[in-house]
Structure formats: structure tokens, C-alpha cells
């Protein structure tokens, strides 16, 4: 059968992409299937596929108008093929071969013509040839035909610059005096250039030269050539060479400019031929003679031939210069403007020159009057029209922008943030420099300590010095080294707090330690007293103190301030960090620990319980590996953090000193738990316990086949046993999610090998049932097993089958009939109707005849069939009878609500 979606995508959509050109391969066009062995069978197969495809064409034309033109073409050609007797497998194959040969001959002629004038074509021209072949030749086939004639396809056109680099005007005169073809010859020698170079990705020598290795022409190589020239005797040739090398050195200062200059030189050699209309093949020969590798010479020639040199002659060049904002270039070209050129072009250049001159004069007046930003705006306006005038750019560069607006300085956590409002600069882009100074604001952008530069309006000082009055000044600039007057925010003084404070409380003392920040000379500690006078501690060193005047069970608070010495000799204190210590008794060991799983499924949680110790606070830690310490190990309190993580949650005290804690363990296969008692800065390791969980089965599927339930599931990796539990749904009780609580449940064990050989089947009878499957993990050494949480399923009740039979009534008058209903098990019938239909066709639905008798809902026992008599309407000598559930009445139901009813006609019935 035809895959319509694939056919539309691969054949019709591809044809539309080719401009509604039908596929030339007729076997593809008709989605022809593989050839059958028997010829008659193959003929029938071809005819069927032809009919199927044509029918689909007609259907698609009606449904989607976008395919109408393509399908009209297909149908017209289909009719032509039919008239020619070609709608057979052999006819379609031969016609396809003929079309391929015809397209190949046409492409060969086209390639021969192209080879006479060029060595390459661009992608657009290639697509024209490919589409011109009508799809009869593949992309690779067309490329081979072109390659056989010496024509290659250039996928990406060479984008050439439209204007000469600024240094070329200086360079070209010197090259003519030195009789050099390219400026690179002045650096590496004519032989090295002639041996080959590339241009498309920048100037690259193919081979090494005495001046340097193969590769790009670098600033170092140009500098070495300048140094060599310095030792020559002074003459006209040296002056010309120095001018060429100076132009190259200037271009080498900016990335890419030297490559642009060398490319333009080659373009200038080819330009006269391109303007004269010489073929690309001739231009490629000229470029190759210069040393450009053959492939790039052909690509450059194609690009030059396509442009025809400079478009529009001198007039076009002037227009282009004006469009690009190169007024000085337009003025330079103006004397060469032909007499027949439009007079308005000359007027446009002269008007632009007058406007620029006026703006420059006005800018000078504004600067003298102190309105520098107005002057910058006028210079910027002039620079947009005369971007190639370096003098204008230099005048604009020398004008600094106005300073920024309001400067805001804020300090937090040892870092200073400087933000400001942009200044009223009207010419951009503007960049900002932030400078930090101590004692007084910085007078210039080079004074003080630079914080950084940005074109945004915010910077951060990550490491400002402490205990100094810091001033932050912001400068605005448009050009490197030219900055505005400063804008300064309020001074700020940083007094960082102590770092890493730690409190260790014993039964009779509180020890506090810390690390001083950089620049701090010491610390001051004060014990805070609620409702009383605070007391400064006398014995405090650089790293901490010990307060022994404490009582166990009472909390003590301390404020610790870092101390700094100012430059004037005075002392400054930070705001301070408040810490709390609670003297505690030594820890006592936890005597026991247990971890248990609940029997029911759902979200799994473990119950951890222990007996409370006599002293200290209990922490439960867990990990996937056993604890590294034996019970009874005494540690420093922080050391216990190295093992696992603390179990979260609130411990709940219970009777008999028992404490419980519940924790979720979803997805956990095994876990170790250890009880640790904390007190007086120490940790006492107690007993540990291990919990092992079992991964449940996945994707349990339960299907009824008669009175049997067929179960299937995905086993967890490594599982070998499963426990299967089932119970009648009406006897399972209220705990439906806990198979252990089901009444009248049946339990069996399923081995994985037996499951994979025979599956899992349960004899559940006709009624509805509940099913649970749990993975078993056996302990071969200790015996017993661990079960996973149950995965639940259900088995629907089997439908009760009710057979009905119509027969003639005995010993009764003509026109009476009897309906007999028999059930295979006790059930409740829904309301039924008897449908009468004249003729020999059996009614299949109630609406296909007339209802002549209605039967109300009632119980039906297999031991007591139901027999009903009813009258048959007269008028038809031949008729058929059928029984159906009454329209709108439910078709299922039993006294217990455990099944459904299926009506079946007895074959012996009328």
C-alpha cells in the first residue's frame, strides 16, 4: 500500500521545491514497488500502484490547492505516457533511461560552452543547470560532467571590497617607480611571491623565503625589511622603497588591514581587463601569473568578471564614495568625471564639501567658546560625510566628553560598588574609567589606583584596603587617553568583620575563635548581658578567647569587633559579629539503634528509633558506606561532618525514653545510619544500622483471558524472584493498597527463569480481582528475604454470556413466537427489545427494524433459562428477528456488580 505521507514528502514536495518540475525518474514518480517474480503478478501490481498514485494525485489536488499546478502537470504527462503505451514497468524504465541520456547530452553541451570562457561557476549557475536537467541527473552527476570539461563549482562567492584602503594611494605610486607588481615583493622578494600565495583568508605565502617562513606577511617581517632598507645608500629608489614599506608598516598595525591592502593590489591588476569585459578565464590567467594559487585565481576572476571592475565607471565610483561617507575620495575622483556625466553629481560633491567646511568652522568657534560637546556634535556630523578625512577624526578625538553625573558608592562584605549616571554626552560611544584614591579624590584619570574601565554605568572594587578614607572618581572618554574631568562620590571607609567565627562550649567554658581580615590589628570581645551591663573581656588575642566564667545549660552571647589602626594613629572598630555559646555536659552514648521499613507500599519511609542517652543531643547521620569509626569513638564535633549527611526531621519522644524519627528513602537501595551524641564541643559515636531496600518491578500489565489473568512486568536488574498475591475484589477488604491485609488472598512465588519461559498466569475465575507483585531479595547466608514495595493491578470481571433463540410457538395460533434466553452464569439482564425486520436480512442494530416486544431487566440463572412468548405482526411472509439491549439502557450488570453481559444469537435460531 502506498505510504502517502512519505510519498508526498519525498516526491511531491521535492518536485515543488524544483519549481513544480515532476520527477524525471518515472519509477520514483509512481512509487513503483519491487518487481514480482511472476510476470502476470507484476503487471497486476504495477497497474494497481498506477491507479493508487493517480487517485492520490486527484485527492490531493482537491484537498490542498498548493499542489494543483504540480498535479495538473503530472496528470497531463500521465495521459501522454498512457497514449504512448509506456505505463508498464518496462515502458517506464526505458522512458526514464531515455530522459537521463537526453539530460546528460544537454549538460555536456552546456559544460563545453562554459569551458570556453571560464574555469568555474557559482552556486546559483550550478542550480540553473541542475534544474535545467529536469531532475534526471543527480547533483553529483552534474558536478562530474562539469569537472570532465574543466569547470568547477564555487560554493561561496568571493566578497570583494568596494573601496581602496587608505594606504593604497601612497603605495601605488611607489610600486610604479620600483616596477614591482605587488608590495609583498618589497618584503619577501619577487621569487617568493611568484612561487605562490593565497588571498581568500588573508595573504599567505605558500613557501618559505629568506625573509621568513611560509604563511602570513607579519608586522615583524615588514619591520625587518625597513631595517634592511635603512642600510642602503640614499637615492630615488630608496625613497620609493621606504614609502612602500612605511605604508605596509602602517597597515600592519591593525588586524586585517594588511590583508585588505594586498588583496586590493591584485584586484587593481585585474580591474582593466574586467572593465573591458575580458572572460573570467583570461582574468584567472593574469592572477595566476602574479603568483595567486590557481583555484583562488579562478574564484577571484569570477568575482571580478561578475562586477565588471568598478561599477558605473568614475560616476559610479563617486556615487558609491558619497554613499559610504568618503567625501575626500569623491573629491579626488571629481576631476576624472566625464563631461557627459549628470551635472547634479558634481554639484552634490561640491555641496557636501561646503557643508563639511561650514561645520568645521562652526566647531572651532564652539570650542573656543567652551561648548565642547556642541563642537563634538558638529565634528561628528562632518565625520559621517567625510569619514576618510583623518584630520576631522583627530579633532573629534581630542575633545573629551562631559563628566558623568551623580556617582553613588556603596560597601558590602568587603567589596565596594561604584555606580553613576551617564553624562550629557551627545556623541559616542562613551567609555568610563574608575580610579580609587585614599585621602582625597583623584585629580586625573592617571592618578590613584585604576579599578577598571567599562561602557556600562557600574563597576565593583573587589579588594579595597581597610581603615582608609577611600574616594572613587569616574572619568568619561571617547578616545584612548582623552578623559573628562572627574565625577566623585562620597568617601567610604571599610572595616571588615572577623571571618570564620567558631564557638566550642564545654561544661565549664566557652571558647570562641576566628580569623582576622586583612589589615586588622586585633579584635575586641564583649559579653552581652540581657537587662544588665555588657562586660568587655580582658584576655582576647588575635585568634580568639576563652570565657571560663560560665554555667552549663545557660546560653551566652558575645560581640566580636575587628580592630584597625588609622593612618593618624587612632583606632577604629567594625560593627561586630554576635555569636552564641551554650555550655554543655559531656556526651553520653546512645545504647541502641534500629531502622525499619513499613509493610505497606506508597511513598517509602524508614522509621529510625533509639533510646535517649543521659546527656547530650543525638544526631542521626546517613551515608551509602559504613561509618569509619567504631562505637565509642570520641571526636571533635566538627569532625563528624565528614561522614555522610544529617537525617532531617524532628525526633519524637515516646514512652520508655524511646525516640523515633521518620525519613523518606524513595530510590534508595541501601543506606547506613549511625547515632552520634553531641555535647561540650565533642561527638560520641554510637551504634549503627544498615537498611537494604529492593527495587520494585515496573510497568505491570494485567490482562484477562477467559477465567485466567495473564501478568507481565519488567524485572529490575539482578532480580531473580517475585512474589505474586491476588484476591477477589469483593473480599480484599478496605486496605486495598496493602496486600498483606487482603483477606482470602493467594500467594505464589515466581522465578525469573520460569517467567521468561512460560510467563505468569493466575486462575482468578470469572469475578473481578486485585493483583500485587513484589520483588524478593533473598539472603542466601542468613535465610529470609527482603520484599520491595508492592506494584498493584486489577483484573476486571469476565462478561456473562447470554444466548438467545427464536422459535415458533407450539400448539398456538399462527403469528406467535418464543424467545429463549440462557446464561452461562448467574447475572442480571439489562432491558431488552425484540426487533422485527421484513425480508431475509438480519437486523444488526435496533434501528434496522421495528421493536415488537420489550423485556424488562431481570435476573437470569444458568439453571433456569428464560422463555417468553410474543406476537409477530402480520403482513410479511418472510422476516428476521433479533434481540438487543434496549436503546439507552446499560448493557452490563450482575447481581453482585462483578461482570458484564454479552448477547449471542444461537445458530439454531430463526
Image (cartoon, rainbow, N blue to C red):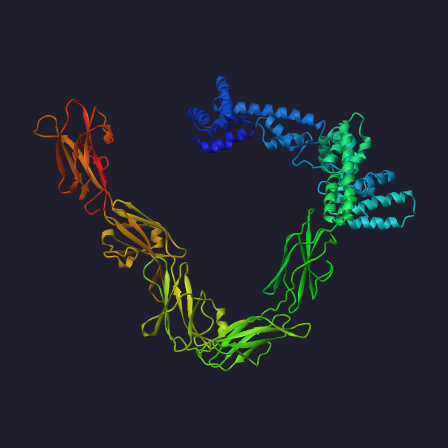
- Residue 228 placement (x, y as % from top left): 86, 50
- Residue 278 placement (x, y as % from top left): 76, 28
Residue at point 41% right, 63% down?
670
- Picture quadrant where residue 299 is located: top right
On the picture, is 760 further left or further right than 386? left
Residue at the outermost left position: 811
Residue at point 20% right, 44% down?
894
Residue 555 higher or lower than 105, as above or below: below
Residue at point 59% right, 24% down?
101
Residue at the outermost front position: 369
| Front position in the image: 699 or 622 | 622
- Picture quadrant where residue 160 is located: top right
| Front position in the image: 343 or 550 | 343
- Residue 643 placement (x, y as % from top left): 48, 68
- Picture quadrant where residue 180 is located: top right
- Residue 142 placement (x, y as % from top left): 62, 30
| Front position in the image: 428 or 84 | 428
Residue 785 higher or lower than 523, as above or below: above
Is residue 680 visible to the viewer in this orientation of the structure?
yes
Where is the C terminus found, in terms of image quarters?
Answer: top left
Is residue 24 visible to the viewer in this orientation of the structure?
no
Where is the N terminus found, in terms of image quarters?
Answer: top left
Amino acid at each position: 500500500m502506498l505510504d502517502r505521507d512519505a510519498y508526498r514528502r519525498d516526491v511531491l514536495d521535492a518536485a515543488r521545491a524544483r519549481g513544480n518540475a515532476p520527477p524525471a525518474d518515472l519509477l520514483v514518480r509512481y512509487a513503483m514497488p519491487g518487481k514480482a517474480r511472476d510476470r502476470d503478478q507484476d503487471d497486476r501490481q504495477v497497474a494497481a500502484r498506477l491507479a493508487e498514485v493517480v487517485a492520490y494525485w486527484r485527492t490531493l489536488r482537491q484537498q490542498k490547492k498548493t499542489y494543483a499546478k504540480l498535479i495538473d502537470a503530472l496528470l497531463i504527462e500521465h495521459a501522454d505516457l498512457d497514449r504512448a503505451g509506456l505505463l508498464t514497468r518496462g515502458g517506464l524504465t526505458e522512458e526514464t533511461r531515455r530522459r537521463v541520456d537526453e539530460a546528460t547530452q544537454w549538460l555536456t553541451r552546456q559544460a563545453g560552452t562554459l569551458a570556453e570562457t571560464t574555469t568555474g561557476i557559482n552556486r546559483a549557475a550550478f542550480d540553473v543547470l541542475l534544474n535545467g536537467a529536469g531532475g534526471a541527473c543527480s547533483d553529483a552527476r552534474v558536478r562530474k560532467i562539469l569537472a570532465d570539461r574543466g569547470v568547477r563549482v564555487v560554493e561561496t562567492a568571493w566578497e570583494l571590497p568596494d573601496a581602496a584602503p587608505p594606504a593604497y594611494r601612497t603605495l601605488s605610486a611607489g610600486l610604479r617607480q620600483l616596477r614591482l607588481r605587488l608590495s609583498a615583493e618589497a618584503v619577501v622578494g619577487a621569487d617568493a611571491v611568484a612561487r605562490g600565495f593565497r588571498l581568500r583568508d588573508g595573504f599567505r605565502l605558500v613557501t618559505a623565503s629568506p625573509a621568513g617562513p611560509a604563511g602570513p606577511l607579519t608586522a615583524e617581517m615588514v619591520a625587518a625589511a625597513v631595517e634592511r632598507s635603512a642600510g642602503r645608500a640614499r637615492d630615488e629608489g630608496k625613497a620609493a622603497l621606504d614609502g612602500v614599506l612605511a605604508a605596509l608598516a602602517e597597515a600592519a598595525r591593525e588586524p586585517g588591514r594588511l590583508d585588505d591592502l594586498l588583496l586590493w593590489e591584485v584586484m587593481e591588476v585585474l580591474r582593466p581587463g574586467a572593465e573591458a569585459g575580458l572572460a573570467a578565464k583570461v582574468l584567472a590567467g593574469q592572477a595566476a601569473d602574479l603568483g595567486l594559487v590557481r583555484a583562488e585565481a579562478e574564484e577571484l576572476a569570477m568575482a571580478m568578471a561578475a562586477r565588471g571592475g568598478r561599477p558605473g565607471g568614475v560616476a559610479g565610483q563617486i556615487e558609491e564614495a558619497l554613499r559610504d561617507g568618503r567625501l575626500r575620495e569623491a573629491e579626488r575622483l571629481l576631476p576624472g568625471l566625464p563631461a557627459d556625466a549628470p551635472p547634479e553629481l558634481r554639484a552634490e560633491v561640491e555641496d557636501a564639501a561646503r557643508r563639511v567646511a561650514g561645520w568645521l568652522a562652526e566647531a572651532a568657534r564652539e570650542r573656543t567658546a567652551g561648548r565642547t560637546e556642541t563642537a563634538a556634535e558638529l565634528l561628528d556630523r562632518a565625520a559621517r560625510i567625510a569619514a576618510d578625512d583623518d584630520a576631522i577624526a583627530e579633532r573629534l578625538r581630542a575633545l573629551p566628553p562631559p563628566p558623568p553625573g551623580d556617582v553613588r558608592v556603596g560597601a558590602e562584605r568587603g567589596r565596594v560598588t561604584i555606580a553613576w549616571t551617564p553624562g550629557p554626552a551627545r556623541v559616542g560611544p562613551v567609555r568610563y574609567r574608575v580610579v580609587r584614591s585614599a585621602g582625597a579624590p583623584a585629580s586625573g584619570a592617571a592618578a590613584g589606583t585604576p579599578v577598571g574601565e567599562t561602557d556600562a554605568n557600574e563597576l565593583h572594587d573587589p579588594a579595597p584596603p581597610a581603615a582608609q578614607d577611600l574616594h572613587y572618581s569616574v572619568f568619561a572618554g571617547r578616545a584612548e587617553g582623552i578623559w573628562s574631568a572627574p565625577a566623585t562620590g562620597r568617601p567610604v571607609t571599610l572595616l571588615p568583620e572577623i571571618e570564620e567565627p567558631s564557638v566550642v562550649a564545654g561544661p565549664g567554658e566557652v571558647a570562641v575563635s576566628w580569623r582576622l581580615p586583612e589589615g586588622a590589628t586585633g579584635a575586641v570581645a564583649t559579653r552581652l548581658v540581657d537587662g544588665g551591663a555588657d562586660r568587655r573581656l580582658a584576655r582576647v588575642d588575635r585568634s580568639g578567647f576563652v570565657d571560663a566564667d560560665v554555667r552549663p545549660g545557660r546560653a551566652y552571647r558575645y560581640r566580636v569587633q575587628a580592630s584597625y589602626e588609622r593612618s593618624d594613629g587612632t583606632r577604629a572598630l567594625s560593627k561586630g559579629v554576635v555569636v552564641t555559646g551554650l555550655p554543655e555536659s559531656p556526651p553520653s552514648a546512645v545504647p541502641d539503634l534500629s531502622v525499619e521499613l513499613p509493610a505497606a507500599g506508597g511513598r517509602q519511609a524508614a522509621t529510625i528509633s533509639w533510646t535517649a542517652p543521659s546527656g547530650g543531643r543525638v544526631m542521626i547521620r546517613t551515608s551509602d558506606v559504613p561509618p569509619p569509626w567504631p562505637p565509642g569513638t570520641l571526636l571533635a564535633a566538627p569532625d563528624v561532618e565528614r561522614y555522610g549527611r544529617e537525617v532531617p526531621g524532628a525526633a519524637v519522644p515516646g514512652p520508655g525514653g524511646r525516640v523515633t524519627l521518620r525519613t523518606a528513602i524513595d530510590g534508595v537501595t541501601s543506606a547506613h545510619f549511625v547515632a552520634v551524641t553531641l555535647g561540650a564541643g565533642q561527638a560520641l559515636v554510637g551504634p549503627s544500622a544498615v537498611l537494604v531496600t529492593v527495587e520494585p518491578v515496573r510497568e505491570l500489565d494485567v490482562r484477562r483471558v477467559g477465567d485466567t489473568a495473564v501478568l507481565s512486568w519488567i524485572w529490575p536488574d539482578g532480580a531473580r524472584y517475585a512474589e505474586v498475591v491476588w484476591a477477589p475484589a469483593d473480599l480484599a477488604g478496605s486496605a486495598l493498597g496493602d496486600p498483606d491485609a487482603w483477606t482470602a488472598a493467594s500467594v505464589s512465588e515466581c522465578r525469573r527463569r520460569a517467567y521468561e519461559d512460560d510467563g505468569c498466569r493466575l486462575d482468578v475465575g470469572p469475578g473481578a480481582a486485585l493483583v500485587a507483585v513484589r520483588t524478593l531479595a533473598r539472603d542466601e547466608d542468613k535465610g529470609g528475604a527482603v520484599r520491595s514495595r508492592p506494584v498493584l493491578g486489577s483484573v476486571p470481571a469476565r462478561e456473562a454470556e447470554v444466548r438467545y433463540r427464536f422459535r415458533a410457538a407450539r400448539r398456538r395460533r399462527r403469528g406467535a413466537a418464543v424467545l429463549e434466553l440462557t446464561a452461562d452464569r448467574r447475572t442480571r439482564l439489562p432491558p431488552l427489545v425484540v426487533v422485527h425486520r421484513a425480508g431475509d436480512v438480519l437486523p444488526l442494530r435496533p434501528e434496522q427494524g421495528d421493536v415488537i416486544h420489550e423485556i424488562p431487566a431481570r435476573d437470569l440463572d444458568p439453571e433456569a433459562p428464560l422463555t417468553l412468548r410474543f406476537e409477530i405482526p402480520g403482513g410479511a411472509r418472510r422476516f428476521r428477528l433479533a434481540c438487543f439491549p434496549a436503546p439507552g439502557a446499560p448493557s452490563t450488570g450482575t447481581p453482585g456488580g462483578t461482570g458484564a453481559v454479552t448477547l449471542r444469537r444461537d445458530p439454531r435460531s430463526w
